[in-house]
Image (spheres, helix red, strand yellow):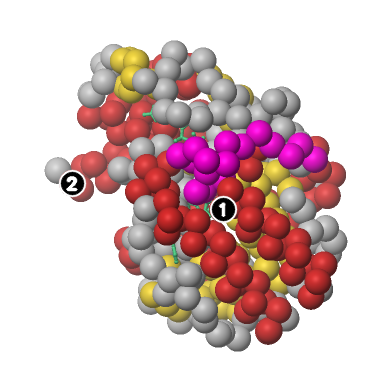
Amino acid sequence: MRVLVTGGAGFIGSHLCERLLREGHEVLCLDNFFTGSKDNIRHLLDNRHFELLRHDVTQPILLEIDRIFNLACPASPIHYQYNPVKTIKTNVLGAIHMLGLAKRVKARILQASTSEVYGDPLTHPQSEDYWGNVNPIGLRSCYDEGKRVAETLMMDYHRQNGVDIRIIRIFNTYGPRMALNDGRVVSNFIVQALRGEDITVYGDGSQTRSFCYVDDLIDGMLRFMECGSGTGPLNLGNPAETSILEFATRIIDLTGSTSKIVYKPLPSDDPRQRQPDITRAKSLLGWEPRTGLEIGLKKTIEYFSDVLAKEG
Ligand code: NAD
Ligand code: UDP
């Protein structure tokens, strides 16, 4: 099949392109390189089944394709808050353009949504039928509300035009090729630990997250895309929950670092707790994450060690 991956030069997108090529597909990787990098896909450039398009999803495009994975959007709070108007345009116009394309060429489209649609959740763990607790005017809303509108557009194109859709809600995912400077907790803590710098815990560190290794996520995405039924939304994530303070200690142990933990103010609207209920993904796809935190973190630490060593 000819598969379009928007945001294909980013962290998750580059792993997805790699897997799709391995499975024998033609891959069109579309990216504007805002947070993605050619380094993430350099090893794919010589593959004759791989094509790179520099394009911004806020502009329309016409391509002949069978599948669309719509991932284009900065994912880390620092990056999506850098130009919030652009973030919301990327989510909303990007979804409109990709859905228009899907409708025209009769492609199936999967939208990368997020656990952020649950906001600061009032139920725990979060299942797909929870409607969320999102601040519509806060600093995170360009991303959260942008993704919520993208989900709405997906459902409306499906109901109104019969577009074949899949919506996934991705919970915190980590692994090699996360950007060094993207401010997310996994990259921050590992890089700080490897450099022997202070580990910056925001707030008192009692807030929780549940971290999924990227290979497990890709597995779930591919299974859902090719699943015969179901539009979603579908949670994809690892239910193993940890507090951010425990997570900092874990990174210090795994890196053998001498770094100390320091406390910094909690950013506004930072969700208190987050854990996916993956009952639906288990029953629909027979999917659940297989990579434990320790193994996933070791691979990620190895990646960042190499990157830092190359930087000198
Ligand atoms: P990332 O920032 O590494 O990748 C996003 C990619 O999209 C980058 O390559 C970037 O250059 C590209 N991009 C941004 N704006 C664009 C535009 N207007 N036109 C074309 N390309 C554009 O982030 P990621 O972690 O790989 O996230 C990928 C997707 O998964 C995003 O949609 C994100 O919202 C979603 N997601 C990720 C996580 C996570 O934990 N990583 C969690 C929930 C949802
Ligand atoms: N966080 C932290 N120190 C950091 C970066 C993040 O304590 O250096 C916290 C952040 O406040 C949040 C959690 O770690 O509670 C996860 O943050 P991230 O930006 O990775 O993802 P998100 O908040 O979008 O889940």
Which residue position holds label 2?
311
Quarter of the rendered image showing ligand 2: top left
Q: What's the residue at 74%, 39% (across, down)?
A: 131
Q: In this rendering, is residue 310 above or below 3? A: above
Query: Could you say whether the residue bearing mark 1 is in a helix, strand or loop?
Result: helix
Label 1 neighbour load within 10 Å: few <14, some 14-19, many 20+: many
Query: Could you say whether the residue bearing mark 2 is in a helix, strand or loop?
Result: helix
| First-in-chain label (1 vs 2) | 1
Mark 2 within 8 Å of ligand 1, using the beta carbon: no
Q: Which residues are magenta?
A: 129-144
Residue type (three-letter) at the residue carrying disc 1: Gly
Residue type (three-letter) at the residue carrying disc 2: Glu
Q: What's the residue at 81%, 71% (across, down)?
A: 160
Q: What's the residue at 54%, 59% (across, down)?
A: 91
| Left or right of residue 13, residue 167 in this image | right
Which residue position holds label 1?
146
